[in-house]
Image (cartoon, grey):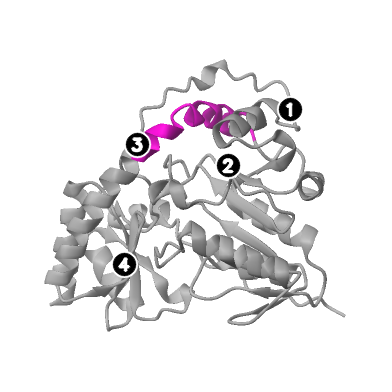
Amino acid sequence: MQKHFPEKAVHGGRIIALRQKYGPDLLDVSASMNPFLPLISCDFQEIDLCVYPDDTYSALKDKIGHVFSRPTDEICVGNGSAELIRVYCNVLLSPNDTVRIDPPTFGEYGLSAKLAGANVVSGMDADLRIICNPNNPTGILRSRDEMLALLDDCTKKNSRLFVDEAFMELAARNESISDIRSDDLFVMRSITKCFSVPGIRFGFGFGPADLIEKIETVRTPWTVNAFAEAFTMRALDHYDDLVLSAEKISAEREWYFARLTELDLSFEPSSVNYILVHLGRNASEFTESMLEHGVLVRDCTSFGLLESIRISVETREKNLRVVEALSACLR
């Protein structure tokens, strides 16, 4: 019998192809990267590509452990968050297990659960609950107290909690639960968004040592390449600089809220560097119109939001371009 495969999750990341069509000046506000970056110097010429990376990534885990105050046997690494989501589900889930994922949220959670043979549900108890905090695409941030209460509820019900904190550094890091050690908790992080390096592909996670050992066993060897390892080591030296990034994003986000209100657009009260905007009209058609005005936004149809787009918070100059394009397309 031929195995049934779910459909591949739809993501953004179309900017290379679209710039070939619309020109190199096409502004990408679909990917939600940090616009206020720390200055990081990394000389890739120092990397010896003639040797394999250390697949235990001991030096890298030492650095992560120092920054996040976690022992190295409670740290796993991967080729971006997507790999860790996939591996975690393969390790933890058995056929017909249930996974609670409340939409709208990142599509890779549901796909990874289904590929592991699990059944995805929403709004009910399950063997595993997956939460994105702050959530993508809404930008809604759950407080640390709320997350701890959810963890306590999962423990009482003999289930597990997976928390994706990929955007936490750009929101309010004091709301993170990455310091919590529990047999029922796995917390995932990424450098992609906070250091604006989607091409590097590096993610890491925290969990109980026995789970981490299984994840590191199932993970394909050497998936973190030498460039990603070197950049991450340097980037983590600037981890505290991201506090200033979050402050600048917060100020610019408030400016954005005011401009969207002036355009009579409704939006979610985001706590991070992107805003979910409700258009009251077809999102795919509106996205095409924005492209004609030189701006790529994230069509949220793939999230099940047929009349919403997501726009990233950028520098004021870029944000003004987006507001002008929005105004023109709304006429």
Within-10-Å neighbours for mark 4: few <14, some 14–19, many 20+? some
Q: Nearer the viewer, mark 1 or mark 4?
A: 4
The image's mark for residue 54 is: 1
Which structural element holds mark 2?
loop
Q: CA distance from mark 1 to mark 2?
A: 15 Å
Residue at the image position 32 percent from the left and 70 percent from the top: 268
Residue 228 painted magenta: yes
Residue at the image position 52 percent from the left and 22 percent from the top: 44
Within-10-Å neighbours for mark 1: few <14, some 14–19, many 20+? some
Query: Circle 2 is placed at which residue position?
Result: 202
Horizontal and vertical percent for residue 31? 40, 55
Horizontal and vertical percent for residue 151? 63, 63
Three-letter code for the amino acid on which mark 1 is drawn = Asp
Q: CA distance from mark 2 to mark 4?
A: 28 Å
Span of residues in magenta: 225-243
| Label 1 with label 2: CB-CB less than 8 Å | no
Q: Is residue 123 left or right of residue 267?
A: right
Query: Circle 4 is placed at which residue position?
Result: 269
Kindly report the secondary structure that dominates the magenta region of the rendered protein: helix
Q: Is residue 98 left or right of residue 278?
A: right
Residue 146 painted magenta: no
Three-letter code for the amino acid on which mark 2 is drawn = Phe
Q: Is residue 163 left or right of residue 72?
A: left
- Specify the quadrant of the image occupied by residue 112: bottom right
Q: Nearer the viewer, residue 10 or 105?
A: 105
Horizontal and vertical percent for residue 51? 72, 22
Q: Is residue 172 above or below residue 263?
A: above
Within-10-Å neighbours for mark 3: few <14, some 14–19, many 20+? some
Q: Nearer the viewer, residue 82 or 258?
A: 258
Within-10-Å neighbours for mark 2: few <14, some 14–19, many 20+? many
Three-letter code for the amino acid on which mark 4 is drawn = Pro
The image's mark for residue 37 is: 3
